[in-house]
Image (cartoon, coloured by chain):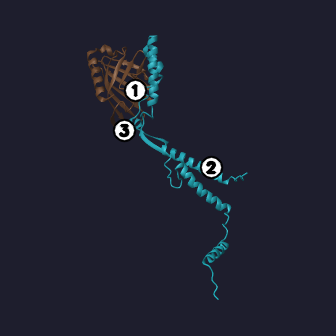
Chain colours: A brown, B cyan
Amino acid sequence: MTRLTLSLVSSALLIAASAASADDFDGQHALVCSLDEAAECDVDALCTTVSGEEIELPDAITVDFKSSRLRSPDGQRSSPIHSTDVTNAVLIAQGSQNGRGWSMAIDRATGRMTGTIAEPVGAFVLTGSCAKAP
Amino acid sequence: MTRVVRPSLLFAAALAATLACKPAEKALSPVELEAKNRGECHVVAVSQTQFDPSLAEEPVRTLSETHKQGGDVVGSGAIAKGAAKGAVVGVVGGAIAGDAGKGAAIGAGAGALIGGVRRRQETQKMVTTTRTNPEYTAYVAAKNAYRNAFDSCMTSRMTPQQPPK
């Protein structure tokens, strides 16, 4: 998927998220989060911008709280959600898989999301936006 | 008194003397005969196959191509296609059972999402594939055809001739 398409999808999700209420991000409803930007960082904390395709990360991820899993759009790949924390302003989900720890923090007012994937040789930093899954 | 000799008689005598003095054709030794046969069979085999091993140049045996990992041929592409097909089947099955998500999970298997993320350096890795050079295959076939023709020719010459009945 091209960057233009990604941007259009992100914009659509952002508009949808803006229209949505904080109740959408209550840790109960499933969410769809799109990837806007990604960076790959090494052990010296030097980061370079990468595309989702380059690091084999899907353009969008479904956050399914009921089954406690993150899923790729095609359902081929998934990761377990180990914990969810909901505050007034932020929804945080965390998990680990194959020696990596991940976390995502979602602004409950806007749906803006920042995520990290940490591993012994560095980390990935991701930004995007989330909306209530249809 | 002068003795007259006819020129025709002189020529005949000279010819007879020459023939008498010329040594009989020497019989070839086995080694010489084999060398003669080999030379002639080479000409025959080249004529039959249009291949001359003394002139043909052997092509390189293999061809190598280097390309980025993750293309259509190499990497996880083919595997991913299979998994995607499984996921589609799973979604259909799950929808029938009233749980599309569960069906997708069944069909997809357990592909890691976060655990499957790879560093760019890994996904950009170059891989080299090697295959047999078609020109080399043709060369070997022509060489074998020449060899068969040559051997056949040599065999026919080594076989003792049957006396006519």
Residue at point 48% right, 18% down? B106
Q: Which mark is residue B152?
A: 2
The residue type indicated by label 3 comes to Asp
Please name the amino acid that badge 2 sits on: Ser
Quadrant including the C terminus of chain A: top left
Identity of the residue furthest to the front in this view? B1
Q: Earlier in the sequence, mark 1 or mark 3?
A: 3
State which quarter of the image contains the N terminus of chain A. Answer: top left
- Relative to residue A52, is residue B88 depicted above or below? above
Query: Circle 2 — which element?
Result: helix
| Residue wearing tag 3 | A44
At 64% across and 58% down in the image, what residue appears?
Answer: B34
How far from the left and from the top, in percent, is residue B112?
45, 26
At label 2, counting other C-alpha atoms closer than 10 Å, the crowd grade (few under 14, some 14-19, many 20 or more) is few
Q: How many marks?
A: 3
Can you give x and y, in whole percent of width and height, for residue B115 in the image? 44, 28
Q: Nearer the viewer, mark 1 or mark 2?
A: 2
Q: Measure the C-alpha gap from mark 1 to mark 3.
A: 19 Å
Q: Which mark is residue A25?
A: none
Q: Quadrant of residue A8?
A: top left
Residue type, mark 1 in image: Trp
> Mark 1 vs mark 2: same chain?
no
Evaluate if marks 1 and 3 touch, with contact meaning CB atoms under 8 Å apart.
no
Q: Chain of mark 3?
A: A
In the structure shown, which secondary structural element does the residue marked by tag 3 occupy? loop
The alpha-carbon separation of the residues under discs 2 and 3 comes to: 74 Å
Q: Which residue has dot 1 on it?
A: A102
